[in-house]
């Protein structure tokens, strides 16, 4: 016999309560509670002897080498820590149109070339639609099986019968169970189906990759319990108007979380970018004002990025401030510091700042490059083409040190830059072993004098 109980679950964080609340006490979101009817089995009475496995002593446990399956897509293997681990559950999230399904279809195609049996389960598309995409990607394999199904019980039965080497579920939000009365995509359904799929993968020692939807804020849809269930969480990011995609590791129980992979969206699918810095600077113009090259970090990987600025006299009463690829508040702070400490005037100027290539700058190490690009455009003086700029700018106009400075300098030297501007603090401890000329600066004024 089963009993029914009504609970209210927050759609943002999964917080449960037995009464409706206007504001979630866990994540502070408003009007996010949805009513759910849960069926619970009645507890059985009586004495029942349970079989308890005794705890194992750490010294008696034999260490086993971690076996990985490489997909031959080096950028994808990189973010996973070297390849797919058998029995692991991987969750990939991203906005619509980022290329999640395309990337996973290519991963499946590469594994079939290694005589691996792959099962691709789609809850959103028919097998005919997947076949059309596979033909466009030139994927033709005999050990590649497709299923279009949404019921979790049927999906597990199909996997159990097929016994594949890899399972791809696209997506977990479309799967439902008959044991739950809620509709697919509901928090209860997502949590229940995600738990069953993860437990089944570990029971069969079978790697499983699930696709998750994201909200408008860029977070995974549903409760964050999905992130705790899986072994590896990957997010694919990028601007739908640009061709570059960044695959970022958020959680990885079998590797580092400081890895990113860079891909390019083309008509023939997603192509990995083996030399990202050279690729991002391939269209850079020489001897133009308002363009400065900096070295940013995406995870543990240094990337050479071109920062562009355009400063022009405004035709309106209020000057415009536009930032593409960086935080608008960061731009406002740099403009204020330039006016206060460097004596520049932007009160009657429209300011536009853009990060070329669709990459988003998230760390403050690019502050000095943004400031120099603004000065270059305002004064119509070009920054030397063989010069790179690195540094964080403080509110008093000082140039502050940044992390992993040696890796950034090595990346600039590898691409042929002859000179680099870095924060003065700690410059004596830098050991590069390259011919690049390193100049340390302590303030914005000193950086302007050194460059211009």
Image: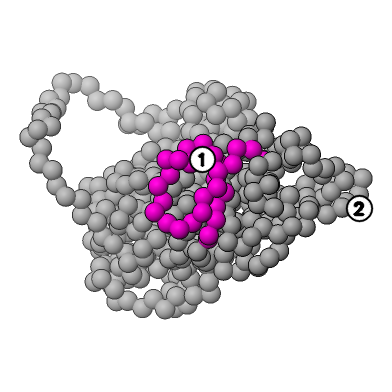
Q: Which mark is residue 15?
A: none
Q: Is residue 144 magenta?
A: no
The count of marks equals: 2
Q: Secondary structure at mark 2?
A: loop
Which of label 2 and label 1 is nearer to you?
A: 1
Res 7 seen here: no
Label 2 crowd bin: few (<14), some (14–19), many (20+), radius 10 Å: few
Q: Secondary structure at mark 1?
A: loop
Closer to the chain start, of discs 2 and 1, is 2
In this picture, residue 113 sits left or right of residue 220: left
Based on the displayed image, in which of its 4 quarters is residue 53 positioned? top left
Label 1 crowd bin: few (<14), some (14–19), many (20+), radius 10 Å: some
In the rendering, at what x and y percent does residue 326 appear?
A: 64, 47
Q: Nearer the viewer, residue 221 or 256?
A: 256
Q: Residue tagged by mark 2?
A: 315
Based on the displayed image, in which of its 4 quarters is residue 290 positioned? bottom right
Q: Nearer the viewer, residue 231 or 166?
A: 231
Q: Residue tagged by mark 1?
A: 402
Q: Nearer the viewer, residue 449 or 322?
A: 449
In the rendering, at what x and y percent does residue 159 appear?
A: 28, 58
Q: Which residues are magenta?
A: 417-444
What residue is shown at x 36% (from left), y 31% (from top)?
A: 40
What residue is shown at x 67% (from left), y 57% (from top)?
A: 383
In the rendering, at what x and y percent does residue 100 appear?
A: 47, 60
């Amino acid at each position: 016999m089963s009993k029914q109980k009504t609970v209210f679950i927050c759609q943002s964080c999964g917080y449960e309560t037995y009464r409706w609340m206007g504001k979630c006490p866990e994540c502070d979101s408003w009007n996010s509670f949805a009513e759910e009817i849960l069926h619970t089995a009645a507890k059985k009475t009586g004495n029942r002897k349970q079989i308890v496995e005794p705890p194992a002593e750490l010294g008696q446990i034999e260490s086993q080498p971690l076996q990985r399956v490489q997909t031959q897509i080096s950028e994808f293997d990189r973010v996973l820590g070297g390849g797919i681990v058998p029995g692991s559950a991987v969750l990939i999230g991203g906005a619509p149109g980022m290329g999640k399904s395309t990337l996973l279809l290519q991963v499946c195609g590469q594994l079939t070339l290694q005589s691996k049996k792959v099962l691709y389960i789609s809850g959103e598309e028919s097998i005919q639609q997947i076949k059309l995409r596979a033909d466009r990607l030139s994927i033709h394999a005999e050990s590649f099986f497709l299923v279009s199904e949404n019921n979790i019980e049927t999906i597990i039965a199909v996997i159990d019968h097929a016994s594949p080497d890899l399972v791809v579920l696209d997506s977990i939000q479309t799967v439902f169970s008959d044991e739950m009365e809620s509709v697919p995509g509901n928090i209860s359904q997502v949590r229940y189906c995600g738990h069953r799929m993860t437990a089944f993968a570990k029971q069969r020692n079978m790697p499983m990759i699930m696709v998750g939807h994201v909200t408008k804020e860029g977070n995974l849809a549903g409760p964050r319990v999905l992130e705790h269930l899986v072994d590896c969480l990957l997010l694919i990011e990028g601007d739908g108007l640009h061709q570059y995609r960044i695959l970022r590791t958020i959680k990885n129980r079998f590797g580092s979380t400081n890895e990113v992979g860079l891909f390019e969206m083309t008509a023939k699918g997603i192509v990995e970018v083996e030399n990202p810095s050279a690729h991002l600077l391939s269209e850079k113009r020489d001897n133009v004002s308002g363009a400065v090259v900096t070295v940013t970090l995406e995870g543990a990987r240094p990337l050479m990025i071109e920062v562009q600025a355009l400063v022009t006299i405004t035709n309106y009463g209020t000057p415009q401030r536009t930032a593409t690829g960086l935080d608008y508040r960061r731009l406002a702070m740099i403009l204020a510091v330039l006016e206060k400490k460097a004596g520049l005037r932007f009160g009657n100027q429209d300011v536009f700042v853009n990060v070329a290539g669709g990459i988003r700058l998230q760390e403050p190490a690019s502050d000095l490059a943004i400031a120099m690009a603004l000065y270059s455009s305002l004064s119509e003086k070009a920054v030397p083409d063989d010069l790179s700029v690195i540094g964080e700018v403080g509110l008093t106009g000082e140039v502050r040190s940044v992390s992993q400075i040696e890796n950034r300098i090595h990346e600039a030297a590898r691409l042929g830059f002859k000179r680099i501007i870095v924060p003065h603090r700690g410059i004596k401890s830098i050991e590069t072993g390259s011919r690049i000329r390193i100049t340390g600066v302590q303030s914005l004024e000193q950086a302007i004098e050194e460059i211009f």
